[in-house]
Amino acid sequence: MKISFLLQNAYGIGGTIRSTFNVAGALAARHDVEIVSIHRTGGTPKLPLDRKVKLVHLIDTRAETGADRDNPLLEQDSAHIPPVEAKGAHFSALTDKRVAEHLARTDADVVVATRPGLVMYLAEFGQDRYLRIGQEHRIYGTHEPNIRAAQDLAIPHLDAHTAVSDADAATHREQFPGIKTKLIALPNGVPASEVEPSDGNAKLVVAAGRLIPVKRYDLLVKAWATVAAARPDWKLRIYGRGPQQAKLREQIDQLGLAGHITLMGAHSPIETEWAKGSIAAVTSREESFGMTIVEAMNCGVPVVATDCPHGPGEIIKDGHDGLLVTNLDSDAIAKGLLKLIEDDELRHTMGKNALVSAERYHPDAIARRYEELIESLGGVRDGSAPAAAPTGTGSGTAERKPAPVPLSKMLRRTAGKLLRPLRRGVAKPATPPVKAALKEIVRKPLRCTASCRVDADGNIHVFVDRKGLSGEKLSLTVTRRKEGKPVSVPLKAPAGPRAPYTAVLDRKQLRLGEGRWDLHVVRGDDNARRRVVSHLAEGRGLVELEALPGAPFTWWVPYPTVDGFLALRAWNRPVHAEARAVHQDDTTVTVEGTLHGAEFADGAEPVLVATPRADTADRVTAEVTAVDSTTFRVTVPYADLRHARGTGEENTVWDLALRLTPDGEPVKVARLIGDIVDRNKTDLYPKIDGIKPYFTVNSDLAISCSV
């Protein structure tokens, strides 16, 4: 059976794309499955797609290389899709033409449309010779009225239409009494996570999703003010990007929660971040399904979710694998979070239960339900094949029916069939010695993909996929950028037929200089060297990890680069002053921290030295209070900074360091411990009366003063 999914754009990272990829991959184990992307905007999909799934496109609008980027029909309005949907999905007269052509020629047995506009196209241009199934990924009543009206007209022309929750499927049946279209619930498929599950011990709550009004992150931030007052040792991270980011940043600053809540930005794959948390928070006003809930549960993280329409209540079993709290109620959210924060046993039990509960949403289980739906609709139809050839190679142009084979070519084919068996009986000449020697010397090119994981001792375990590796004497190297002197680490052969190659970066044995390090696999046979592509960079072990005792201070954070390679950021300092907390009020900034690689001597009078970057400003000093031999606190008045700023610059910056003794070397104050690579992008503080503390690109602490 051939199943074809219509996607608006398979080259993004949205939830519909993710769920379609997941279920398509599961169905491909037993069927011929293709995804037809109406638009192509990238070279390769950003999300992983099973190799068995064929991906084609109808319109290519890639910058510079897209064959359709200058097509005048792109500028003409669609004649079939309401303007709001057409604008949001980039549907045009060209999509009208290409989709109609595709639906006329496809050889699929089942065609599945994944968004309202595609449902409308399928109802308009689909044919009776294949099953037509629509999908609803939102909630019935949440669409713009014109979209809702057009989709309502389309649904009765389909064989089936699916919602992602039982509640929304029931709503659809109420809205369409008596129609022949089968209206049922088919939830999204979410695969089991490859990451090491959360152990529930980190004092961290995680939320993730688009920063849009429906997610109501403002309620979560408000609730966290209550949580932080009761348990200031716990932190909240919110992953995602969107139009609400600036408002959330302002709300966090106004509530004085800059040191308690971190806006992390977008992160993919997100499962490495779910696993770092001990609790997940979902505070949406409404959720059609709640894919993030299942993703978190797949990582062993219990979810505190608002009991909103429709998804959370169907996914979470309240009190068993998570908590459901009153919708749109920040006090209820805070109460639910504190319940799990303060009850370690309950939190751990719910995390284990969540892992089991998430299994029912595995793509294999959802694929079986799709098969049951297709069977209930009568299975594959025996309609006549399309007049044109099957779907093309993705160029966006319909392929013509092949011309008849000439008689001369038919005769050559027949002769070939007669002669080939005779040729097989003739012995082939032996491979020349030189050619055999070249074959031995020339190796297959290396293709290296790896994941990494930080263990309880802070060592980084690297797992290199055996696919793409060949030859003997393989090793892993780490090379500091702009230096070019690699450090080699043994790469152990796989322990089993499907096991990866492994290497361990031991933080007690391996001393890496400060900077960014790239990972390569090197083959000793021919010195071939290939940079390692990142699959999963797991940093859960870093969240609660402590620095090694003694000097020098070292810290490593593995991470995927923006172009997808596995890299390592390392810090190596003789002595380090960790800025654990930065507090601001109307007149001062206070830093609380820990000294590593040294101790405060009895009777010493350590000071903070703020060194200006501009010659026109003066140095600022402040007395440091040594709470114990390694813990300190220091307060800098804003008035001192303004007085030292001078008049030469509109904005003056000071870099902060501790001087442990009058003649000692300055010790930079920085925030290096933890799992975050670039603190300057995440650990942000407000500007108060012109004064703003911030972390530099090296994660060192600085203070700016502006007019």
Image: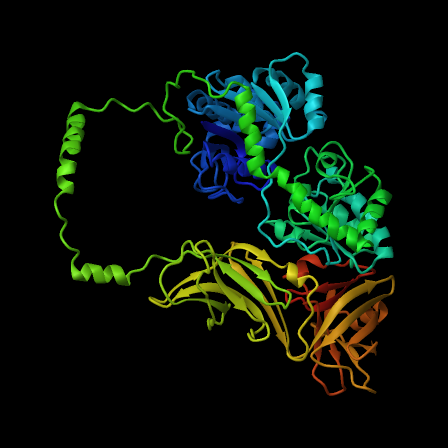
Q: Where does residue 644 sit, x and y in percent of width and height? A: 80, 73
Q: Kindly tell me whether residue 425 is visible in this rendering.
A: yes
Number of numbered tags placed on the structure image: 0
Q: Position of residue 120 (x, y in %)?
A: 57, 21
> Residue 79, relative to residue 578: is it above or below?
above
Residue 256 appears at what percent x and percent y? 83, 56
Of residue 368 and residue 440, the one placed in the foreground of this image is 368
Q: Is residue 264 above or below residue 409?
A: below
Residue closest to the eye, 650 or 162: 162
Asked if residue 103 lies left or right of residue 255, the reply is left
Quadrant where the N terminus lies? top left
The one nearer the camera, 17 or 299, is 299
- Residue drawn 38% across the image and 67% down it: 473
- Quarter of the image with the C terminus in it: bottom right
Residue 444 found in image quarter? bottom left
**Residue at image coords 81%, 55%:** 257
Any part of residue 208 in sight: no
Q: Position of residue 210 (x, y in %)?
A: 67, 42
What's the colour scheme? rainbow
Q: Identify the residue at image location x=66%, y=46%.
A: 355
